[in-house]
Image (tube, rainbow, N blue to C red):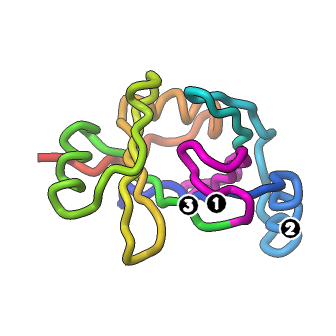
Amino acid sequence: MSAYYHVCFTVPDLQAAMRDLSSAAAVTWHDPRDGRIGDWDYRIVFSTGGPAFIELIEAAPGGPWGDTSRPRFHHLGFWTSDLVAGAERLATAGFPESFSGCPYGRQFAYHRLDSIGADIELVDMRQQAAFLQTWQPGGLSMPPIEEA
């Protein structure tokens, strides 16, 4: 079983993206939620029925998600057993950190993989219970990348 659990797209119109994915691929959604990290407000939603999930984020351009003025693939999300060790492993492998939520009290980090034109998101495994409570009540635990 893989530690991969979601794919994320940044979109300028959350409702339009939800509607179109529902129509094109029969994707169903939870209710979107508003959020804030640092100086950046955003709206977020996850599909139902995962893993794997589809995540959509609508935010003003700039901030953790870069140019959000047009839709784009932003990241693949993975659970990690140790965020610090995982971030160090990725940076050492040549995948630089593009944003860390840690200074904002959020246990995730994005690392850039130019070869796919997007980021890898590592999320600390200790956040999984809260994720499941919010986005998949009663969902089964998902495995992390076991960091050495």
Q: Name the outermost residue toward the left.
A: 148
**Amino acid type assigned to the residue bearing label 2 in the image:** Asp
| Separation of residues labelled 3 and 1 (CA atoms) | 5 Å
Q: Is residue 92 left or right of residue 65?
A: left
The secondary element bearing badge 1 is classed as: strand
Q: Residue 142, percent across and down?
A: 42, 46
Q: For residue 20, which numbered disc appears in the image?
A: 2
10 Å crowding of disc 1: few (<14), some (14-19), many (20+): many
Residue to which mark 3 is pinned? 74
Q: Residue 61, percent across and down?
A: 68, 50
| Separation of residues labelled 1 and 2 (CA atoms) | 13 Å
Which range is magenta?
Answer: 45-71
| Sequence-wise first label, 3 or 1 | 1
Quarter of the image with the N terminus in it:
bottom left
| Magenta span includes 74 | no
| Sequence-wise first label, 1 or 2 | 1
| Separation of residues labelled 3 and 2 (CA atoms) | 18 Å
**Amino acid type assigned to the residue bearing label 1 in the image:** Phe
Instruction: Mark 3 and mark 2 in contact? Answer it, CB < 8 Å.
Output: no
Q: For residue 9, which numbered disc appears in the image?
A: 1
Rendered residue at 73%/64% (across/down): 70
Instruction: Mark 3 and mark 1 in contact? Answer it, CB < 8 Å.
Output: yes
Q: Quadrant of residue 9?
A: bottom right
Q: Residue 86, percent across and down?
A: 23, 46
Rendered residue at 71%/45% (across/down): 59
